[in-house]
Image (cartoon, rainbow, N blue to C red):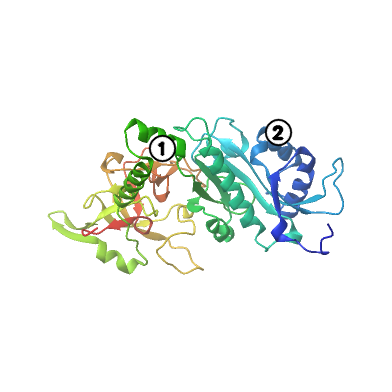
Amino acid sequence: MAWPKGSDALDDIAFDLISELDVPKAFEIESESYPADEAATLDAFVQRQKQAPELFLGAYIHSDEPKSGSSENRKLIGYICATLSSSSTLTHSSMSTHEPNGTSVCIHSVCAAPAHRRRGIATRLLKEYLSRLQQASDESENKKSPKYSRVLLIAHDDLRALYENAGFEWVGPSAVVHGARPWFEMRKLLDATRPTDSEVEAASQMLSIPPDIMQALQASLASSSRRARPTARLLSSNAQLDEVLTVTDSSAGTTKVNKYDLLCPRLGCGCLILKSGAAQLVDQDIVNQEVLGSHSQVSSSPSSTPASIPCWIVEPNPMVFENIGFSKSVPQSTEGPKMKYLLCADCDHGSLGWTFEGDTRFWVICSRVGYKAQDT
């Protein structure tokens, strides 16, 4: 088959696992795509392919020149490589160590060759990759413990749209330091393993329920589960703060408390974080600008970073929360206690705010949570 010169023939891209023969070509693409302080070494690529070959996926087009040592007429133009971790977030350790029994897929690199960029190859690679991971989990022998539960990566903020279009969600600033630019974590939670048709039929026979009725019942239960959690109302500006607070007067003075329950803002979660009236509004100094990342919904001038931000302060211990999780300690540029980010304990969405090791105060950023109105 003679392909047009210079054509990607995008409709004929083939996706396949990368063999050891193609590792040098993948490394070549890596070296052309990242600055020297961010690019991985050839040895790292060789190890990733040996340790997790099922997580090293390539995008190929036809080539008239077979590669050395093979009769296959194809050319590698892009790839994704990853390893496994038991951690639910990306750290230096999870990025450098492969844990064969881990369920978090830690993506190290998503690359398209320079001559084939801005043609949708990276997006197609990501979607194919996620589809394969989901299928592997669905076909896992242990239905109660899927093979893969989440896909994690870190990216610079200018690539946020690419990964969101592929189905990833923005988590927040990453503690990983690799190169000169800051990194931000993104995540894709894989669907829970779905029952097969044969499993549904077997269950329906045990209960003497026709399979079609069983399927309808399952759909109804799933729908009810989705309706059980309210959709969180989000703030678009600081001006809306007055709408979600209550002013109370006491002998100690005037305080402003949260009028509504605070919810996880992630669509599809919406779990209860904090009950109404449990936190006071403060204008808190920002001691670590990374806690803001670039996804705060309270707008500020793109050219300036706020010195303080409206927060709900929660005291005197985490038991005040209905549902809260914490990140690992975040390294600080100055002396003092280490910071931890606040996360939704149900879905790990964050950061919602921060606290410090040994502190009895917890700051929830007003724009990072949703609000449950009384009629929802």
Observer-nearest of 31 and 358: 31
**Who's the residue at 58% across and 36% down the image?**
84
Where does the N terminus fall, quadrant-wise? bottom right
Residue type at mark 2? Lys
Residue at 29 percent across and 44 percent down: it is: 321
Residue identifier under label 1 = 200
- Foreground tag (2 vs 1): 1
Q: Whole-Å distance between the Cαs marked 2 and 1?
A: 38 Å
The answer to whether residue 258 is above or below residue 347 is: below
Residue pointed to by mark 2: 50
Q: Which of disc 1 and disc 2 is earlier in sequence?
A: 2
Quarter of the picture containing the C terminus is bottom left
Q: Residue 58, position in %: x, y?
A: 70, 47
Specify whether residue 34 is in view: no
Q: What amino acid is at disc 1?
A: Val
Q: Residue at x 65, y 38 (%)?
A: 54
Secondary structure, mark 1, is: helix
CB under 8 Å between discs 2 and 1:
no
Image check: 247 left or right of 66?
left
